Image (cartoon, rainbow, N blue to C red):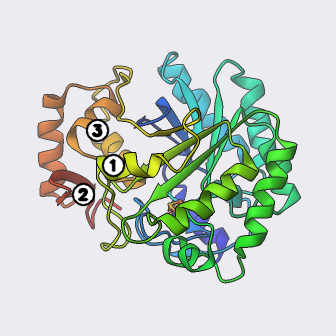
C-alpha cells in the first residue's frame, strides 16, 4: 500500500491518545504520527501485532498542524491532563519526516511538559534523524541485541538494516545529544536472555553510557505467540549484567489519570485498545473512570464485535474486534 494511502487510512483516528498508563512515565499523553504497524522492525514481542508495512523510508504521513490542533483540543478539555508528552505509536516514530519541525513546534507551545521520544533506534545512523531528535527532552532508544543472529530473531529488521551501522548511529547520537539519553532493553525468554548475549549488550552499553538503562520483558500479548517474558526472578538475574547505579527493571504503573467525561467512553476505549491491548484496570486508569463504570460500555462493544476479550498470562485483555478496527 502506498504511504499516502496508509496515512489516510490511519489518520481517520486522532493523533493524540491516552493518557496511557505508562509503566515508566506516569500519565503519558501519546502522540502518534505513524500509520499502525509501519515500522523498520517486526519485533517478536511487539504488543501492537505483526508489522504490516516494513520500511526504512521516511514519509510525511500527516500535517504537523493537525497534530498541534489535536493537542490544543485535548488540553482545552483537560488542562492538567498529562505529566509528559510521548511520541509512541504502533510503528517507528523516526519514520515521520517532519519530526524535527513537529518536536520544535510542540516544545515551543508546551514548554512545561517533558517531551519524550521512544524509538527503536534503527535509523540513528542518518544524521537528519539525529538532528530531528535534538528538540526532545529525553530519547529512549531500544537495544535488544548486540549480535547478528539475536538481532534477526528478536527484531526481525528490514533487510537493508545492518546492526553494526545501527550501533554506530547510537554512538553518534549519544555524542551529539546533550539531554536525557535512556536505553531500553526488552528481554525475551530463550532469545536474548543468555549470558553471551547479555555480555555483548553490556559491552555496547559501556560504549554508550546511557543515563539510565530500563530492562523490560513481555507482559502483554506479543505479535508472535512464541515470545515469552522472563519471570521476576530471571529479570533480577539479568539486572546483574548491567551497571547497578543506572539500571532498573521497569515497574508497574501507579499514577492516577485525570477524571474524564464518560460520554465518549466507547470511542475512547477503542482509541486506546487500537494502540495496544489493555486489561480492565489499565483501561480505567488510563481513561480516568472508575472500573465499574466500564462494565456496560465493554458489554456493548463486545456484543457488537467492536472488542474482543482474550487471556494472556492469566489476565483478560481487550483488543479491537473486526467491527472496531
Ligand atoms: S516493538 Fe516497536 S520497533 Fe518493534 S515492531 Fe513494534 S513498533 Fe516496531
Q: In the rendered view, does 179 fall on the left or right side of 320?
A: right
Name the secondary structure under disc 1: helix
Residue at 38% of width from left, 45% of height from top? 236
Q: Which residue is mark 3?
A: 283
Q: Residue furthest bottom?
A: 159
Q: Which residue is mark 1?
A: 270
Residue 170: mark: none
Judge the density around disc 3: few (<14), some (14-19), many (≥20) Cα neighbours within 10 Å. Answer: many
Q: Position of residue 8 (x, y in %)?
A: 58, 63
Q: Is residue 244 visible?
A: yes
Query: Which of the marked residues, 3 or 2, is nearer the chain's N terminus?
Result: 3
Residue drawn at (32%, 35%), measured in percent from left and top? 264
Of callouts 2 and 1, which one flags the residue occurring earlier in the amino acid sequence? 1
First reached walking from the N terminus: tag 1 or tag 3 = 1
Rounded to the nearest angstrom, the CA distance separating label 3 from label 2 is 15 Å
- Dividing the picture into quadrants, the one containing residue 91 is bottom right
Q: The C terminus lies in which quarter of the figure?
A: bottom left
Tell me whether the residue at label 2 lies in contact with that at label 1, contact meaning CB atoms closer than 8 angstroms: yes
Relative image position of residue 291 (x, y in whole percent): 18, 30
**Image quadrant assignment for residue 162:** bottom right
Q: Quadrant of the N terminus?
A: bottom right
Is residue 206 placed above or below 54 in the rendered structure? above
Classify mark 2: residues with Cα within 10 Å, few (<14), some (14-19) or many (20+): some
- For residue 92, what is the image quadrant? bottom right
- Where disc 2 sits, the SS reads loop
Measured Cα–Cα span from mark 1 to mark 3: 10 Å
Residue to which mark 2 is pinned: 306
At mark 3, the secondary structure is helix
Amino acid at each position: 500500500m502506498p504511504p499516502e494511502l496508509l496515512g489516510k487510512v490511519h489518520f481517520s483516528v486522532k493523533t493524540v491518545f491516552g493518557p496511557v498508563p505508562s509503566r515508566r512515565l506516569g500519565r503519558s499523553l501519546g502522540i502518534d504520527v505513524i500509520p499502525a504497524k509501519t515500522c523498520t522492525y517486526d519485533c517478536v514481542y511487539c504488543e501492537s501485532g505483526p508489522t504490516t508495512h516494513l520500511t526504512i523510508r521516511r514519509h510525511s504521513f500527516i500535517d504537523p498542524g493537525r497534530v498541534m490542533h489535536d493537542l490544543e483540543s485535548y488540553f482545552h478539555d483537560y488542562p492538567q491532563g498529562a505529566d509528559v508528552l510521548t511520541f509512541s505509536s504502533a510503528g517507528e516514530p523516526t519514520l515521520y519526516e517532519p519530526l524535527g519541525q513537529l518536536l520544535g513546534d510542540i516544545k515551543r507551545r508546551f514548554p512545561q511538559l517533558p517531551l519524550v521520544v521512544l524509538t527503536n533506534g534503527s535509523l540513528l545512523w542518518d544524521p537528519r534523524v539525529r538532528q530531528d531528535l535534538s528538540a526532545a527532552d529525553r530519547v529512549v532508544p531500544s537495544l535488544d541485541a548486540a549480535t547478528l543472529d539475536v538481532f534477526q530473531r528478536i527484531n526481525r529488521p528490514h533487510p537493508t538494516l545492518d546492526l553494526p551501522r545501527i550501533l554506530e548511529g547510537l554512538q553518534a547520537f549519544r555524542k551529539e545529544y546533550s539531554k536525557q539519553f535512556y536505553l531500553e532493553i526488552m528481554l525475551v525468554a530463550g532469545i536474548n536472555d543468555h549470558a553471551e548475549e547479555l555480555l555483548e549488550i553490556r559491552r555496547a552499553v559501556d560504549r554508550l553510557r546511557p543515563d539510565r538503562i530500563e530492562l523490560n520483558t513481555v507482559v502483554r500479548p506479543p505479535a508472535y505467540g512464541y515470545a515469552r517474558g522472563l519471570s521476576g526472578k530471571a529479570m533480577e538475574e539479568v539486572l546483574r549484567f548491567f551497571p547497578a547505579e543506572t539500571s532498573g527493571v521497569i515497574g508497574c504503573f501507579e499514577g492516577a489519570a485525570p477524571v474524564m467525561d464518560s460520554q465518549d467512553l466507547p470511542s475512547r476505549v477503542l482509541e486506546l485498545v487500537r494502540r495496544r491491548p489493555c486489561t480492565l484496570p489499565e483501561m480505567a486508569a488510563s481513561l480516568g473512570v472508575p472500573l465499574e463504570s466500564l462494565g456496560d460500555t465493554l458489554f456493548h462493544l463486545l456484543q457488537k464485535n467492536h472488542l474482543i476479550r482474550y487471556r494472556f498470562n492469566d489476565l483478560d485483555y481487550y483488543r479491537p474486534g473486526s467491527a472496531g478496527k
